[in-house]
Image (cartoon, rainbow, N blue to C red):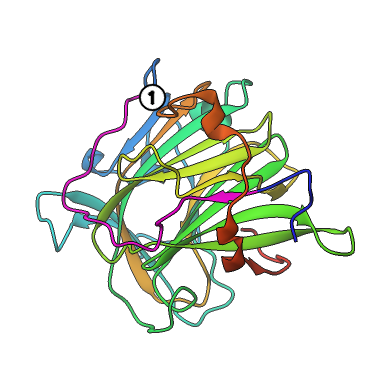
Amino acid sequence: MLGSYQKFAIAAGVCCGLAATTHAAWLAPTNGWDFEYEATSGQRPNELATDPWTRSGYDNNTSRLETDAVDPTRDVLYLYNFPTNASFSGYFSLTSGAGAGDGSGLLTIDVEFRIRAGSGTIPGDDQPQWALWLRRDDRQYVVRFARDRIIVNHTAENEEGVEEINFIPVLVDLGTTWHTVRLLVDSNQQLASVYLDGSNVALASGFNGHASPGNNNVAFGDGTSAVAGAVNFTFLRIANGELAAVPEPAAMTVMFGGALALAARRRSGRRA
């Protein structure tokens, strides 16, 4: 049961399939993007001359540049996650430069991706996944993506009054087609929202992440260690000081959703 001081909302209709061939466009941030990674640059994120990312776990084979097999007009960053290797943790992380934030506590991140076919038939826990992590003001916000769901992290009091981390699944048919995700974070209020494919209706809003002392950073990569599979990316963009594409401030208020029955509560011993 969520504590009365924090409630969480999941958008209605998230179990419906998505038409992924044509996506509506969100408005760009008012002051533009502070950081942009494009696979068309011909470089991995760790090879950039300005604001290079730290690469961990991946090598030049498991993180490489290639042409998308489904859409050959797209140049992509391909990431492969090792199967049945609980010690593997591959990710790219930016802890300085434009990704470190501007002190306002507001952040917008856009990512375009395609989850590729891979091993595993069990929904959610045994299929190709990737994750997006954001740490601001000693708090980490996590969104994991699988072919049939996203998973977000939310901290709340349990029945005994002890705070614990909940990883909450939101069912959505991502399949193996292209999608664009927008993550909005207001670290001042400890609120985050996730939007998909140009929609202004959040898949999940008001999740508050979990305590994670450390430097401000942004990271993306392996969503779960024991899953084989691959993900393609075309771009990742970061804007500080603005919650882009939120129609009004009330969109980031914390609300209650009956869909919390989907919650899968467990304590986290992982980085994400």
The quadrant where residue 146 appears: bottom left
In this rendering, position of residue 240 left or right of residue 269: left
Please tell me which residue lies in front, 69 or 44: 69
Residue 32: % across, % down = 37, 19
In this rendering, position of residue 257 left or right of residue 92: right
Of helix, strand and loop, which one carries label 1?
A: loop
Vertical arrangement, residue 140 with respect to residue 30, above or below: below
Please tell me which residue lies in front, 61 or 256: 256
Vertical arrangement, residue 123 with respect to residue 272, above or below: below
Residue 52: % across, % down = 44, 37
Residue 55 visible, this orientation: no
The quadrant where residue 173 appears: bottom left
Which residue is the site of mark 1? 33
> In the rendered structure, which amino acid carries the disc numbered 1?
Trp
The quadrant where residue 15 appears: bottom left
The residue shown at (39%, 71%) is: 128
Q: Residue furthest right?
A: 160
Question: What span is colored magenta in the figure?
Answer: 8-28
23 within the magenta span: yes
The residue shown at (64%, 21%) is: 103
11 within the magenta span: yes
Q: Residue furthest top?
A: 31
Q: Quadrant of the N terminus?
A: bottom right
In this rendering, position of residue 89 left or right of residue 4: left
Q: Quadrant of the C terminus?
A: bottom right
The residue shown at (10%, 55%) is: 72
Please tell me which residue lies in front, 226 or 167: 167
Give the dominant element type of the magenta stretch: helix, strand or loop: loop
Vertical arrangement, residue 133 with respect to residue 185, above or below: below
What is the total number of numbered labels drawn onto the structure image? Answer: 1
In this rendering, position of residue 31 left or right of residue 248: left
